[in-house]
Amino acid sequence: MSRKKKPLPLLEDIPITGLAAEGKAIARVDGRVVFVPWAVPGDVCTLQVRRKKQSFMEAEVVSFKELSPLRREPFCPHFGVCGGCKWQMLPYAEQLRQKQQQVVDALTRIGHLTLPAVSPILGSEQECEYRNKLEFGFSNKRWLTREQIAEGEVVEQKNGLGFHIPGAFDKILDIETCHLMQDVNNRLRNGIRQYALERGLTFFDLREQTGLLRNITIRTAQQTGEVMLIVQFCIRTADEERQAHETLTWMRDSFPEVTSLLWVNNTKCNDTIGDLDVQTFAGTSFITERMEDLQFRVGPKSFYQTNTRQAYTLYKVVRDFVALTGKELVYDLYTGTGTIAQFVARQARRVVGVEYVPEAIEDARLNAELNGLTNLTFYAGDMKDVLNDDFIARNGRPDVLITDPPRAGMHPGVVETILRTAPRRIVYVSCNPATQARDLAALCTRYDIQAVQPVDMFPQTHHVENVCLLSIKQ
């Protein structure tokens, strides 16, 4: 006979004291840290514990006894349910203060690093409608909120188009309004959903892997106004093929603002399209973004910084930190589509970019040609395999190295190669100060940190970008 589990406790009159790195709030009860989503320092809450470990607990707010004076009213009707924009209830100035502290805490507590004065975080010009890319999933299992269930809402149809619910992989929260992108995302998404419901098109079932409509991705070029719409179908029959063609024709005729209408047939078990052929139904196969006098073609598989205007701020920080004179050989690791490489190329003797996604390197080469830049060389491959002593011997020892790795940071082998290569300066761009701190701790055996500049790329969220300038020890 199995032992009956003890019920998890209800905690009353608990003050919220801080915010954690992943966006959750923090309370302390009997010496344990309690992680609480959707709360704000200064709140006093009744908490229901959902998970209990020896050193910490996870809980959710049952009710508020006192609301923090820091709070503001969230502006999104989906706040607290969709899982995004977790800091909407914080004024933007407070978000920036918390992010600044998050960077300092990561570098000093995780990396145990000695820092110069950390520059004030550079806030985003746009607090809303700043994203240039959003993805929405179709599902025949629309998520119902607790309020809808409590009110006994009768579900006439279960289809939804919106964001995946955290912790429920097969459920989609039907989105009416999203403030993360310009209103074009609402016009396209809501119009497409209405069309699909009126014609009885099937929405995807993630468990059964059936249903015609699977996913839409919207990309915008903020400087040129161009719009890309990528539609993922799951076509298995001739009738579904006909329906897909009719749907694309309706989209082309209904949304003249879409300059690139693309589609892909995805019958795999996941929504990734990196290994699939993307077809052009109408318009061009790309959109074009501008930054200063540079142009960048962005395709359906291209990586481009999600906050276009703030990316310009970030790149200017990088350009200032590298301080090129025209004589330097520069390595740009994790170059993506080569945006940073091209942004600094005219001040360098030569720039070498490395990226593991072959399609991104194709974009980088195309964009370099488009911009008339002839002093760039790009290589595709896994960084830990490409960046080795033979590579350095063939391409030359860099004077300056720029690295902008994914959230996981750099592979230890890459860090070791950098240390052996010993460029005079390193500019480390990171979207995860925790892994940046780990890598910097290793690099600082030979380098000193000269400057630290946090940059906020994602208002209303806990995410923060950070740029560090390192110089080799004399």
Image: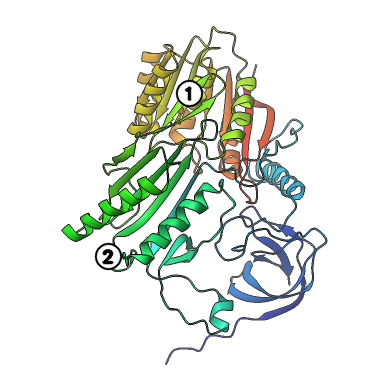
Classed neighbour count for the residue bearing mark 1: other residues with Cα under 10 Å, few (<14), some (14–19), many (≥20): some
Residue depicted at x 48% and y 21%: 331
- The answer to whether residue 383 of the structure is visible from this angle is yes
Give the answer, above or below, for where 340 lies relative to 325.
below
Estimate the x, y position of residue 216 in percent, counting from the top left. Answer: 40, 52
Dot 2 or dot 1: first in sequence order is 2
Q: Nearer the viewer, residue 351 or 460?
A: 460
Alpha-carbon span between mark 2 and mark 1: 40 Å
Q: What residue type is labelled 1?
A: Gln
Estimate the x, y position of residue 172 in percent, counting from the top left. Answer: 45, 65
Residue at the spot of label 1: 295
Q: Which colour scheme is used?
A: rainbow
Q: Nearer the viewer, residue 120 or 469?
A: 120
Classed neighbour count for the residue bearing mark 2: other residues with Cα under 10 Å, few (<14), some (14–19), many (≥20): some
Residue 312 badge: none
Estimate the x, y position of residue 306 in percent, counting from the top left. Answer: 53, 40
- Quarter holding the C terminus? top right
Q: Nearer the viewer, residue 204 or 27?
A: 204
Residue depicted at x 31% and y 46%: 263
Estimate the x, y position of residue 193 in percent, counting from the top left. Answer: 42, 60
Question: Image quadrant of residue 29?
Answer: bottom right
Q: What residue type is labelled 2?
A: Thr
Query: Callout 1: helix, strand or loop?
Result: strand
- Quarter holding the N terminus? bottom left
Q: In the image as oriented, which residue stretches furthest toward the top? A: 327
Residue depicted at x 55% and y 47%: 181
Residue at the spot of label 2: 210
Question: Image quadrant of residue 104?
Answer: top right
Q: In this view, does 322 lie to the left or right of 206?
A: right
Query: Callout 2: helix, strand or loop?
Result: loop
